[in-house]
Image (tube, helix red, strand yellow):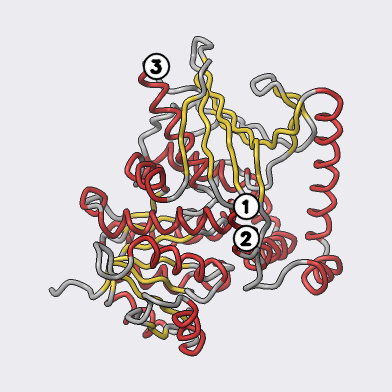
Amino acid sequence: MPSPAYHLIVFGATSFVGRILSRYLLETFGFDGELRWAVAGRSEKKLQELKDSLGAGAERLTVIPADAFDMDSLNNLCKLTKVVVSTVGPYALYGEGIVRACVESGRDYCDLTGEVHWMSRMIGRYEAEARETGARIVHACGFDSIPSDLGVYYLQHLARRKLGEPCKMIQMGVEVFEGRLSGGTYASMLNTFKDAVADPNLRKELADPYSLCGEEHGFNVPQKNHSAAEYVDAFQSWTAPFMMSGINTRVVFRSNLLTGNSYGSEFQYDESTLTGDGKDGRRSAVKAVRQSKFFMLALALPPTRWLLRKFVLPKPGEGPGEDERRSGSFSFQFHGKGNDGQVVRTRVTGDMDPGYGSTAKMLGQAAACLALDETIRESSGGFWTPAALFGERLIDRMERYSGISFTEIAP
C-alpha cells in the first residue's frame, strides 16, 4: 500500500485557531523538511485566501476541499494523510464525521476540543473500532488540557525519582493567565450549556469527575470541586474556581486509567485560580466567584444566552490579534503530596496567550508527534490522552519548539 501524500492535514484550517496553526507549521517545518502537510476545509475560496495570507513560502501549500458533513470528502481526505488535525468546533456540532472517517480508515487524529460530553460520546461510539483499525485518537491537545495533563505527568515522574512513589494528591493553581477567548471557544461553551439545560442526564455526566473513564473504571475517591473563595495552604493563597478545571481534571483521571492507575487508585487532583494572600487576595477571590456565577447563570438562561451571543461575545472566527497573542502568557503551579507528607512542586509556563498562541504550538507539536515519532506510531489504536500517549516526547518537543517549559520548584 503506497504511503499517504502528507504526514498531516489541518482540517478546518480557515478557523481562527486553524489559521494560527497553519502559520506555525509553515514557520516551524516549512515544506522541504521532515513534515509534509496540507490544509483542508469546506470553502476552497477561503482556503486559497488563507494560503495567500501566509505569504512567501506558502506557494506550494496544497488546499483540499472537505465538508464536515460529507463522508465521501472526509474519507478521501483520510486517504491522503497519516494524521488529521481538526480545528472544526463546536465539535459536538461539526466534529463527529472526521473522527468516524479516521477511525474507519485507521488514520491518526488530534484536536483541541474541551467538550467533555462530546469526547465521552466519541469514546463510547468508536473506541472498539479504533482498537481494531489502529487509529490513535487524541482529544484535548490545546490549552485544555495539555498543561494540566502533562503537568501532572511531569510531577509524577519527578515524584517517583525523588520519593520512590507517585503523589497521592496533586493540586494545581493558576498563577498567571494573560489572554482572552475567541468566538469559537464561546460558541462551544454556549452549545454545551444549551444541551445541559435541556438534558438532566448530561448535567449529571458533566458533574462526574470520572466521566471519561468509562462505566467500570473502579475509581470512587471523592474529588474536590472549587466553587467558592477558599484559602489553600499548599499555595499560601486565596483561590477562586478555574474555568477549565471541569475539562482538565477529567482528562487527567483518564490518563491515570489509561496508564494502569500509575498515579494510584486513590489519586486526587483539583485545580483553582490563585488570587493572593491577605485581604486583597480574599477580595479578589470573592469577586471572581461572583463574576463566575453570574456568567454561568447568564449562559444557563436562554434569553441571556441569546443576548450574550448576539451583542457581547465574539463571533466564531474572531479572537485576539497577533500582538495580543504575543503579549499573553500563562503559569501553572503544581503541588504534589506523597503518602508520608513529602512534597514535590513544579511549574508549567507558556510564552504566549494560552488559548491561541500557545494552543496552536501545542496542537502542532502533538500532531508532529503522531506523524513522525515511530515509537508513538507503534502504539495501539484507541482513544488516548496527551499524557498517556505522548508523555516525555511531547514535553521535549514543546520545550524545544513551543515556548512551553516544565520545571521543578525548589523546596
Residue identifier under label 1: 327
SS assignment at label 2: helix
Q: What's the distance in space between the residues labelled 2 and 1, CA to CA?
A: 6 Å
- Furthest residue to the front? 56
| Crowdedness near tag 2: few (<14), some (14–19) or many (≥20) residues, C-alpha within 10 Å | few
Q: In the rendered view, does 341 fall on the left or right side of 390?
A: right
Q: Which residue is mark 2?
A: 323
Q: In the image, is 45 to the left or to the right of 259?
A: right
Whole-number angstrom distance, CA of label 3 to CA of label 2: 41 Å
Q: Nearer the viewer, mark 3 or mark 2?
A: 2
Q: Which sits in the foreground, 100 or 144?
A: 144
Q: Are marks 2 and 1 in contact (CB under 8 Å)?
A: yes
The residue carrying mark 3 is 162
Q: Residues within 10 Å of mark 1 (few under 14, many from 20)?
A: few
Which SS class for mark 1? helix
Q: Quadrant of residue 58?
A: bottom left
Q: Left of 170 or right of it: where is 83?
A: left
> Percent x, y for residue 41?
46, 80
Outermost residue toward the bottom?
A: 45
Q: Amino acid at mark 2?
A: Asp
